[in-house]
Amino acid sequence: MKHTQTEMEAIAMSLPSVRPVLNPVTLEEDMHLSYDAEIQYKRKPPATRLILCSSLDDVHIGEPVMITYHCGMRAYQHSRHVCVSNSHNCSGGFYYTDGTEA
């Protein structure tokens, strides 16, 4: 039976950068894009944790982000339910199918 993952809210404390993260399977450090965020727990005091993310995730310091727990990497990750393309995570601009700039 598959359990649904609970999303939690966190406040981004830093911008994403490539950092070493311990891989629990190989016990070696892998380089992953990640950032620091203060997790707003429901029954514990807030804590700053490392959050794994992708280059498409929008992260702004001081703004809330939604996160889930990645069981395989034993770390928190940026929520994958919503991914929006915008000028912050896309290079080259946006164009209509006829080639004119949007």
Image: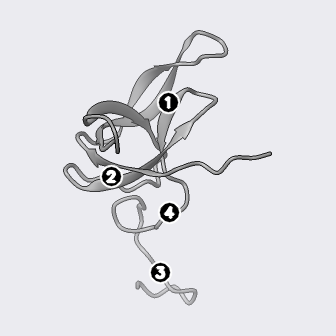
Q: Tell me which amino acid carries mark 2.
A: Val
C-alpha span from label 1 to label 2: 17 Å
Q: Earlier in the sequence, mark 4 or mark 3?
A: 4
In the drawing, what numbered circle is on residue 83? 4
Distance, label 4 to label 2, CA atoms, is: 11 Å
CB within 8 Å, label 4 to label 3: no
Q: Earlier in the sequence, mark 3 or mark 1?
A: 1
Q: Is the residue under label 3 in contact with that under label 2 (CB below 8 Å)?
A: no
The 10 Å Cα crowd at callout 3, few under 14, some 14 to 19, many 20 or more, is few
Q: Which amino acid does label 4 sit on?
A: Cys
Q: Quadrant of the C terminus?
A: bottom left
Counting residues from the start of the chain, the first of labels 2 and 3 encountered is: 2
The N terminus - image quarter: top right
> Which is closer to the viewer, label 2 or label 3?
2
Q: Name the residue under label 3.
A: 95
Q: What residue type is labelled 1?
A: Ala
Query: Can you tell which of label 3 and label 1 is closer to the viewer?
Result: 1
